[in-house]
Every structure is written in structure tokens, then in C-alpha cells.
Image (cartoon, rainbow, N blue to C red):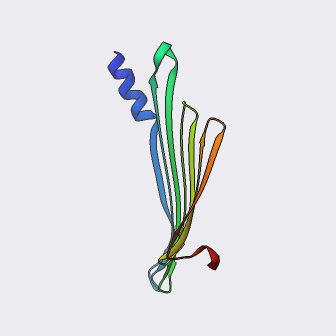
């Protein structure tokens, strides 16, 4: 019975949704939105439930030979660890900002793809 409960919890805590908002095949352009959420719960020490959660959102627009993508990512667990990222790219250039939080300590990082910090 416990295995069945675990299987049901795993199945019900995960879902994914995606949708194509519009697509114009005449000029090859369109928009895509995708969102994925995965949550996992398990019994921890002393019967306290432990969890992990991951979320990813992506929006993409394309047409006229160009592609623009915006993506947001989030991870957190019951141990107090959180990590979030926000990324924007156009064609082959972009920037990603990442924030990590462990307890009260926070760290921030910037990642650049085919960009230099002074070109922003």
C-alpha cells in the first residue's frame, strides 16, 4: 500500500504544460510559451516531509530571421536552498542572471553569451 501511495504522490506532483500561442507559417514567425513544474515530496528524518521543486518558464518569438527567448528557472528545497535564473537571448547573444540563496547568504552571478558587460 505504501508503494502505491508513493507512486501516486510522484505522479500527481509532476505536471507539464505547453502551448503554441500563435504560429504564422506564411512568414515563418510565431510565438511559443512553455511552462514545466516538477515537485517531489518524500518522508525525511523524524517523519518531517522533505520537498524539492523545479519550475521552468520559456517564451520564444521568432520571425524575420531572428529569434528572441526569455527563460526563468527556479529550484528550491526544504533544506532552505533556493536558486533562480532569468535569461534573455536574441539570436546568438544573451545574458543570464542567477541568484542563489542558502539560509541567509545570497550570491549573484551574471553570465554573458557573445556579449561584454560594457555593451549592455
Q: Quadrant of the N terminus?
A: top left
Image point 51% across, 22% down: which residue?
49
**Residue 14 visible in the shown view:** yes
* Residue drawn at point x = 49 percent, y = 13 percent: 46
Question: Residue placed at 54% from the left, 30% from the top?
Answer: 79
Q: Is residue 11 left or right of residue 85?
A: left
Q: Is residue 3 left or right of residue 13?
A: left
Q: Depth check: give the residue in front, 90 or 58.
A: 90
- Relative height, residue 57 to residue 9 (above, below): below
The x and y percentages for residue 89 are 53, 71
Quadrant the C terminus occupies: bottom right
Indicate whether 3 appears above or below 109. above
> Image check: 24 left or right of 109?
left
Q: Give how far across and how far down residue 30 sits, in percent.
A: 50, 75
Is there any visible trace of residue 88 in the rendered image?
Answer: no
Between 50 and 1, the one nearer to me in the picture: 50
Q: Is residue 80 above or below residue 2?
A: below
Residue 67 drawn at (x, y percent): 49, 77
Q: Position of residue 78 (x, y in %)?
A: 55, 30
How many callouts does the rendering have? 0
Amino acid at each position: 500500500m505504501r508503494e502505491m501511495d508513493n507512486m501516486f504522490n510522484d505522479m500527481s506532483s509532476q505536471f507539464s504544460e505547453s502551448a503554441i500561442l500563435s504560429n504564422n507559417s506564411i512568414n515563418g514567425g510565431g510565438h511559443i510559451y512553455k511552462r514545466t513544474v516538477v515537485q517531489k515530496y518524500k518522508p525525511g528524518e523524524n517523519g518531517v516531509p522533505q520537498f524539492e521543486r523545479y519550475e521552468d518558464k520559456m517564451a520564444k518569438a521568432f520571425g524575420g530571421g531572428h529569434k528572441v527567448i526569455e527563460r526563468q528557472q527556479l529550484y528550491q528545497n526544504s533544506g532552505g536552498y533556493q536558486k533562480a535564473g532569468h535569461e534573455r537571448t536574441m539570436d546568438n547573444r544573451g545574458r543570464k542572471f542567477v541568484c542563489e540563496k542558502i539560509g541567509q547568504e545570497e550570491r549573484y552571478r551574471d553570465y554573458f553569451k557573445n556579449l561584454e558587460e560594457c555593451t549592455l
